[in-house]
Amino acid sequence: MKRALGQVGRIVVGTLLGTASACIFMALHKDGTRASDSVTTPAQREIYTQSVKQHYNLRFGQDKPFLPSNATTDNGQFISPKAFPTAKYCSHCHQEAHTEWRESAHANSFRAPWYIKNTALLTAEKGIEYTRHCEGCHNPIALLSGALTKGSPINRKFDEDGVTCTVCHSIQKVDTRGTGSYVMAQPAVLVDEKDQPIYDEVSDKEILSHLDRHSKAVMKDFYRSSEFCSACHKAALPKQLNDYKWQRAIFLYDEWQLSSFAKQSPLPFYVKDGVSTCQTCHMTRESLTTSDSGAKEGKLASHRWLGANTVLPKYYNYDTQMEKTVAFLKAGVFNVDIFGLEKNGEKIIAPLGNEDFTVSPGDLLTTSIVIQNKGIAHSHVPEQRDMYESWVEFEAKDAAGHTLMHSGAIQPNGDLDPRAHSFTNRLVNTKGEINDLHQVWNNRVVAYNNTIASGRSQLVRYQFKVPIDAKDPITVTARVNYRRFDQHFMDFGMGKHYEMPVVAMAERTRTFNLGDNPPATDPQDNKEWMRWNNFGIAMLDAQQYAESVHAFEHVAQLRPDYADAFTNIAIANFQWERYEASRTSLNKALALSPHNPRALYYLALVERNQGQVDNAIADLREVITKFPRSRDAHRELGFSLYQQHKYDEARVEYETLQSIDPDDLAAHYILSIVYRRLGMKEKASYEAAMFADQKDDPTASTYALEFLRKHNEVASETVPWHTHTDFAPEPTHSVGPSAQ
């Protein structure tokens, strides 16, 4: 009673002071009690939970009310939507954050028409209960309040706020499984003198009088970590959703953790100066335009979460968000290098600008464009790769403006040229058809994946003929374009044709004279060694190992003191299964940089392949000393120990690996064996079941083949080494020295 009187007293004081929060929280039920009275105490929360269960469909298990999402609450009970203070309430003191949040994808995570139509497909096909998989991240209040069941009486006015302030700031724990892998408590904006959360509403004055207690209630150290973001920006399609098997959907956290930005792996091709988390890029500190009590030294971590959503700001007329999003997309994240030129099937001339060459009318030219993902800590494109759309647009023109080749144009109906080189994938269903409306619950296989990993490069080749009457000079331009969705999905989502902004994220132009082309330095070019390095990376990923070795040898000649040049040669040779050649290069790398963890990692792989398992174990242990969160090193060390029947030690490595990636397939498989041999039958059974559910379906490739058989225009995109051309058949030749 004393505490209740204290709460009433606080609100009365707030009312007398004229605070906006007091006005909000004096809302009464018909019986005269405050709206919050029905949800604030543990007993009242239990009553609310039991009332929800009376009409709630527990389709996925009596004790699993939130599946197929991995989200849960602190005690497994539902949380009334009335327990979540509105974003408007938070804006009393956080005006700047509120303004930014309102224009963000988080704030609009549920209400956008294209998202609603997509979830409506799932509801119509399988039932609203299955949308819990989506709403654990897109609409957590709907999930955790129990609103996602047929005939729910819950008032869903909270839909307009999507992921609101108290959603993120009430999360108590996360793990890196994704698909909403967080634990949420009932929101509290203040703790009492004993650090216990106060679930009732409090006035602005009281919060401002106890900022330390407010901070304890709404901030956790892990909110500043990439692991926090992984709870939703990593996802899988579980068997409960697709009635098939577990399938990985998105894995931005994993991509970040493996990238040079995280500095947790020795394997990236380039090294960053410092660690960048998700928040480093997506929550940069900016100067205030209004007031905000959360600002420090006049700056606030941006709550716009700038990314790649260019449709939301257009649809809702968020001009500032659009301007900042476009600038974010153009902020030097790609390097486009018109690297090489082949004439009439002859040896490549590269790098362009360093070599002299001639071009004549009638020549058949093939340009090699190297696209480097240098500024993104994850792949491009990220997340929903089946409906996001980014591609290379290539144009070749003569001086009279005649188009000699144009690939990657937008067609009159808004669709992208189907032969364009796009950074996407194709999700295919059991009918051998593309899931063109993001029906991920029907997915069976990824037909192909052309995305560029962080720090990696991709080669795109274009072939065209110089006309006899071409006007000098020939200009070629390559640009990386982006728009939020493909036109088919956008028109479905809007119920009509809707034009989307197209952003040119990066572009380069080179001019070829008819006749002699002497060397000409272009200030936009990287240093020559780096151009060869990026080309070598692209060749490696295209499985052109001889050309990759050749490119990295150029790097070593230009930078003989660069240890990674020799390590890169070794990587290409290792993948080419030339183990002794790989060892030779690694020895050179280690002579230049003793104990280099990247070189030691690959040396360990060579040693194990040559039967020197003890040496491999020693080298991998040294790598882990310097990179304790290298999932690759733990995986390989665990397997080496397993080979030697050191099951207890192997178990430690694979359990450590699972602490980094709970879904590592190799860990599930080896642990199912190791646990069994250590007499841990229950754990062995669990890991065996996880492996059986998560391993690839060997029959699924037939669906991809069926799709590709029907779509010749995109079939070439599945081949790592292909050329975009208007000519047929495509000429066959090598860009470098022949394989040895």
Image: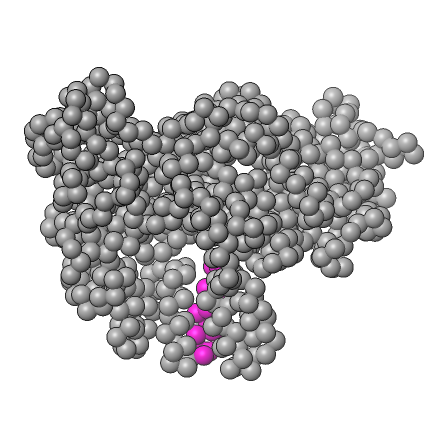
Q: Residue furthest front?
A: 729
User: Does residue 24 appear in the picture of this structure?
Assistant: yes
**Figure check: 35 above or below 232:** above
**Is residue 161 left or right of 587 when viewed as pictured?**
right
Residue 378 visible from this viewpoint: no
| Spot occupied by residue 671 in the image (x, y as percentages of width and height) | 50, 72
In the displayed structure, 227 sits above or below 626; it is: above
Which image quadrant is residue 622 in?
bottom left
Point 57% across, 79% down: residue: 680
Residue at left offset 74%, top offset 23%: 17
Residue 198's place in the image compared with 267, above or below, is above
Q: Is residue 30 left or right of residue 529?
A: right
Quadrant location of the N terminus in the rendered image: top right
> Which percent across, then down, holds residue 700?
51, 58
Magenta range is: 647-661
With 616 as the anchor, is 286 left or right in this view? right
* Residue placed most toward the observer, 647 or 739: 739
Exactly how many numbered labels are in the figure?
Answer: 0
Residues 72 and 642: in front is 642
Residue 382 % position (x, y): 45, 42
Quarter of the figure with the C terminus: bottom left
